[in-house]
Amino acid sequence: MSKIIQIRKRNALYLPKEIVEKMDIKEGDRIIVEVNENSIVLRPVKALKTKEYWSEIRPEEVEEVGEEITRQLF
């Protein structure tokens, strides 16, 4: 799919609704901009969507470490 779009004020680009929906781009998403010799490529950056955690820590543990660091400083 390709579309012709116009550069707006302050060099703004507005992506057509069809492209945004097809690429599942939402407000706040990040886009990689690649510049080649005579072309510009836009690619959405998709965050990792995982439910697995590589680590778990309880709030009490965070507080204990904070208190220990404070004791070492003073």
Image (cartoon, rainbow, N blue to C red):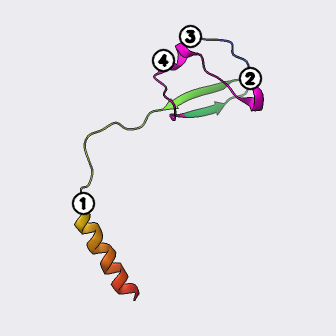
* Of callouts 3 and 4, the N-terminal one: 3
What kind of element bears circle 1?
A: loop
Residue picked out by circle 4: 21
Which residue is at 36% across, 81% downward?
70
Q: Quadrant where the C terminus lies?
A: bottom left
Q: Quadrant of residue 50?
A: top left
SS of the residue under disc 3: loop
- Horizontal and vertical percent position of residue 16: 59, 16
Can you say whether 49 is above or below 7 in the image? below
Instruction: Tell me residue 6's x, y (percent).
Output: 73, 18
Residue annotated with mark 1: 57
Q: Which mark is residue 1?
A: 3
Residue type at the position of mark 3: Met
Task: Give the residues drawn in magenta, as a range.
Answer: 7-30
Point out the image quarter for the N terminus: top right
Which residue is label 2 attached to?
Answer: 7
The residue furthest bottom is: 74
Spatial separation of the CA atoms under disc 3 and disc 4: 12 Å
Q: CA distance from mark 4 to mark 1?
A: 38 Å
